[in-house]
Image: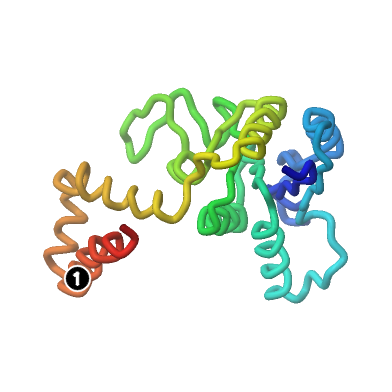
Amino acid sequence: MSNKIAIYLAGSIKKGHERVDESFWTDEDILLLKKSLSEYEVSFLNPAFRADNLSDQRSVFGRDMTQVYCSDVVFVDARDRRGLGVGAEMMWAKFHKIPIVTLAPKDSHYSKSKTTLLGVAVENWVHPFIESLSDAIVENLIEGAACIKRFIGDSDPEVRDIEYIESSMRYYRDSQLPHDGPMKALLEANSQLHKRFASLEKRCAKRT
């Protein structure tokens, strides 16, 4: 096994229209990760470090997707609210079965001891996309580095991929659809929607 690894640092890039107290990957964060992963030669793929033309939107998108694709692990900074890009990067990583470690401490934006959703009280809530797209959710950088070591050191790590997403759709269908009146009404009223929903079983059967 090579001791060279590449880690994509997903998170926010400082933009003029965003608040100044939002968390970002810092030099101190990267130094701590390097120390914690000292047995590896780490290349940090950081979308904040670049010299390409930021006014070329398609190229910017292509660069970020390329870096995710080339990484061994994606490390997501979810300490604060994140934008569209991070979710897309996480989904792209799952499409290619790349491990995702997410930094989401308890009682930060995406992880709450107690909260309410649509007026319903929920305990020990983690944002569904964070919970389902992450292979590990950690409280701090040291714990994150330990998870990275585990994924890198395992010759066949257990990593979620596109099949996990499809299995989650089936799980919803089997466990919650019978109780989901609004969705059932939509399926009954729209034959095209019902046909597309029914095709899920055929799609999943092709994978088996």
Q: Which residue is mark 1?
A: 195
**Label 1 residue SS:** helix
- How packed mark 1 is, by other alpha carbons closer than 10 Å (few <14, some 14-19, many 20 or more), is few
Return the x and y of residue 59 as percentages of the image width and height: 72, 74
What's under tag 1, amino acid-wise? Lys
Residue 19 shown left or right of residue 188 in the figure: right
Name the quarter where the C terminus is drawn: bottom left
Q: Quadrant of residue 75?
A: top right
Q: Residue at x 75, y 76 (%)?
A: 56
Residue 154 shown left or right of residue 142 in the figure: left
Q: Nearer the viewer, residue 126 or 81?
A: 126
Return the x and y of residue 31 as percentages of the image width and height: 86, 34
Q: Nearer the viewer, residue 201 or 57?
A: 201
Residue 9 shown left or right of residue 81 in the figure: right
Name the quarter where the N terminus is drawn: top right
Q: Residue at x 79, y 69 (%)?
A: 54
**Residue 102 seen:** no
Return the x and y of residue 203 as percentages of the image width and height: 29, 65
